[in-house]
Image (cartoon, helix red, strand yellow):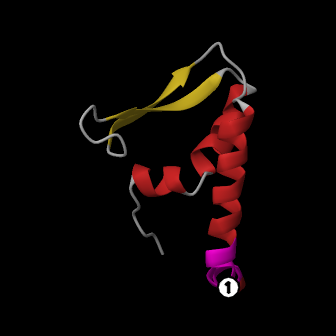
C-alpha cells in the first residue's frame, strides 16, 4: 500500500528536520523552497550537498514535538500496518 502525501504534510510531522539531521552527517539535506505569497506552500524540494550541520534548539524542539504528536495520532495504525 502506498499513499501519496505532500511535502507540506511531511514537513508538518517534524520528520523533514529529523531526516535532515541524519543527512547532515554526510553533508546532505533535503531542501525545500516555499512560496513567497503562501509561506506554508512548498513549491519545490530537492536533495543538496550542504556545509552546515545541525539545527537550532528551537527548530529541533518544535520538530520533536511534532513527531511526538504524529506518533500519538498514528500509533494504532502504524502498529496495525506492521503486523499485516
- Residue 22, relative to residue 51: is it above or below? below
The reply to whether residue 80 is in sight is yes
Question: Is residue 22 inside the magenta stretch?
Answer: no
Judging depth in this view, the residue of 20 and 67 nearest the camera is 67
The residue furthest front is: 58
- Residue 18, relative to residue 56: is it above or below? below
From the image, tell me which residue sits under label 1. 76
Instruction: Specify whether 42 is left or right of 20.
Output: left
- Residue at 76% in and 26% down: 25
- Residue at 45% in and 69% down: 2
Residue interval drawn in magenta: 72-82
Q: Position of residue 1 (x, y in %)?
A: 48, 75
- Looking at the rendered structure, the secondary structure element under dot 1 is helix
Instruction: Specify whether 33 is left or right of 65.
Output: left
Q: Position of residue 58 (x, y in %)?
A: 69, 38
Q: Position of residue 69 (x, y in %)?
A: 65, 67
Q: Quick one: label 1, few (<14), some, or many (20+) residues within 10 Å?
A: few
Q: Position of residue 48 (x, y in %)?
A: 51, 23
**Quadrant of res 20:** top right
Amino acid at each position: 500500500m502506498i499513499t501519496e502525501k505532500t511535502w507540506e504534510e511531511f514537513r508538518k510531522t517534524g520528520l523533514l528536520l529529523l531526516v535532515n539531521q541524519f543527512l547532515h552527517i554526510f553533508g546532505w539535506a533535503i531542501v525545500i523552497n516555499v512560496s513567497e505569497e503562501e509561506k506554508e506552500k512548498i513549491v519545490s524540494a530537492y536533495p543538496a550537498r550542504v556545509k552546515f550541520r545541525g539545527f537550532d534548539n528551537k527548530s529541533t524542539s518544535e520538530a520533536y514535538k511534532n513527531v511526538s504528536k504524529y506518533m500519538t495520532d498514528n500509533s494504532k495504525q502504524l502498529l496495525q500496518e506492521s503486523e499485516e
